[in-house]
Image (tube, rainbow, N blue to C red):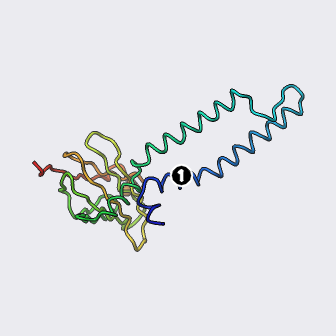
Amino acid sequence: MSEFFYQSGWGAFTMMLLMAIPFAIVFAVVIYSRGFATSGAGTTKGTRLSRLEAMWLGFAGLVFLLVNLLSIRYFPMVSTAQAAATPEEVRDVEVVARSWGYHISDRELEVGEAVRFSAKAADTMHSFTLYHPDGRVLFTMQLIPGLEQAASLIYTFKDPGKYKVRCLEYCGIAHHAMQAELVVVDKRS
Ligand code: CUA
């Protein structure tokens, strides 16, 4: 059962819905308390939603569900769990972040291989954030010093090129200079 939640997009979707319940309750309470307040003023019957309001609410709810459903597979935790479920060949890369640079055990990687990044912070809070050559952020890991277990995430590179690593947690005077580079080559052809 827990594997379903970790390894399936549907599990993550279900969790998202469960987490939305408290917000839905607050939302309902606000709508109805406001409704009773306006009905007390005697101008409108505010206790029930009008047809248009109900349609709008339904539409907003539908958009919320669709956007979450369609985007859930891009969630790094979901893709990591899916890759971990089929660990044919995972290359391990160790990362140690220290003010203000990275020790990375392997900086040349290949297109199509699953890479497990296991990262630790040696002194203070840092992050290991990977950028696609086109500038998009692919994922970010917050690295908390003093943890016994490394933060880990599996990523499969799709495009060759030079990938930037940057620290996105403010960590002192040279935080802006805390960068590294990974080179991803295509050896399949
Ligand atoms: Cu390390 Cu900012």
* Residue 51 or residue 47, whichever sits in front: 51
- Near mark 1 (Cα within 10 A), the count class, few <14, some 14-19 or many ≥20, is some
Q: Position of residue 182 (x, y in %)?
A: 22, 53
| Residue 128 left/right relative to 161 | right
Q: Quadrant of residue 108?
A: bottom left
Residue at mark 1 = 16
* Residue 110 or residue 79, whichever sits in front: 79
Q: Residue furthest bottom?
A: 148
Circle 1 sits in a helix, a strand or a loop, which is it? helix
Q: Position of residue 167 (x, y in %)?
A: 36, 53
- The residue that appears at 30% across and 58% down in the rendered structure is 101
Q: Position of residue 157 (x, y in %)?
A: 25, 51
Q: Position of residue 50 (x, y in %)?
A: 74, 29
- The residue that appears at 48% across and 40% down in the rendered structure is 67
| Residue 114 left/right relative to 85 | left
Q: Is residue 42 above or below residue 75?
A: above
Q: Quadrant of residue 85?
A: bottom left
* Residue 100 or residue 107, whichever sits in front: 107
| Residue 99 left/right relative to 38 | left
Q: Quadrant of residue 52?
A: top right
Q: Residue furthest left?
A: 189
